[in-house]
Amino acid sequence: MDQQSALTEVSSGDGEFARLWREARFDGMECLNARFQRHSYAPHTHETYVVGVITAGTELYRCRGSERVARAGQVVVLDPDILHDGRPAADGYAYRMFYPSVALFGQAMAEALDRPVAPHFSVKELDDPELFQALCRLHLGLEGPFREPLRTDADALRAFTALALRHGDLTARPRDLGREPAAVRRAREYLDAHLDSPVELADLAEAAGLSRFHLLRVFRAAVGTTPHGYLTDRRVAQAKRLLAGPLPLAEVALACGFCDQAHFNRVFKGRVGVSPGHYRRGSNPVQDAAVIAA
């Protein structure tokens, strides 16, 4: 039984829901956001890994002949082809799940360890708050309305490599971080030249001359933020300059690489503390009223 078939009998009443979708960007990875009070899974397997976070309540499940308990705040991980079921405890449970392919994990490990290792996980329930938050952030980003490829790819690579390197049964470790000033400079120059368009992590890594995994590590060490954080700060700085001129807010948003004006408003206010319109009015008190209204 696959995951979609296992969900066909889920009722939409009594507070239960389930949303399943695939991410073509990540080798067709299935993602599931669900809350169950009564629904029980029949025993089933996945060709993929099972990786998720319990966001509320308690899930009970049987795996390899033993009864398991996954509680709110824990990360859950299963190797491919492991027979398991699932059912709610008395308080029900909510979770966010990923089903990454062996190939997807292999690609991440190839970048981190210079070879496509398939990690094995002997511990099923993990108490790792930092990893829990990273997986939640990735899942929410995939389900949300705003997709920024640089952030999405970086969040996925960091989360899955952190899971494997911290909790997988691996003998190899990533090479020492070192300093890569020329590569970081090339990455910053590439980001500065692409403020008005989407940036792919793979393209950025190619411009820097490093693997995606190594670039993320050395960039943060050198700059103090992620490539996406740097790009966002530069876009907001550019938006401030353009807000001094006559461009309507919607055109400023597009000129600075934001998906739309709503995305622009959310990110700008998160960085500056006020909306773009408020910033324009405060920094240009004598500007023509028609321009301000735009």
Image: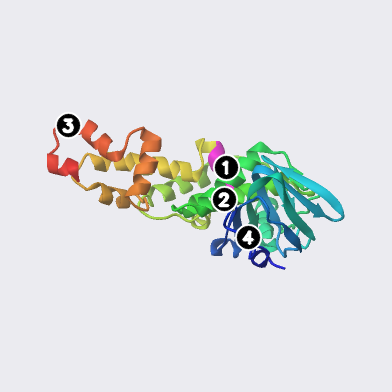
Residue 17 locus on image (x, y percent): 58, 55
Q: Quadrant of residue 85?
A: bottom right
Q: Which amino acid does label 1 sit on?
A: Val
The answer, for residue 4, to whether it is visible in the render is yes
Label 2 CA crowd tier, 10 Å (few <14, some 14–19, many 20+): many
Q: Is mark 1 on a helix, strand or loop?
A: helix
Q: Is mark 2 on a helix, strand or loop?
A: helix
Residue 218 is labelled as 1
Left or right of residue 215: residue 1: right
Residue 10 is labelled as 4
Left or right of residue 152: residue 96: right
Front position among marks 3 and 2: 2
- Magenta span: 212-221
Tell me which numbered mark, 2 or 1, is placed earlier along the sequence.
2
- In the rendered image, which residue does mark 3 sit on? 285
Front position among marks 1 and 3: 3
Q: Does the magenta stretch include residue 218?
A: yes
Front position among marks 4 and 1: 4
- In the rendered image, which residue does mark 2 sit on? 139
Label 3 CA crowd tier, 10 Å (few <14, some 14–19, many 20+): few
Tell me which numbered mark, 4 or 1, is placed earlier along the sequence.
4
Q: Which amino acid does label 4 sit on?
A: Val
Main SS, magenta region, reads helix
Residue 269 locus on image (x, y percent): 36, 37
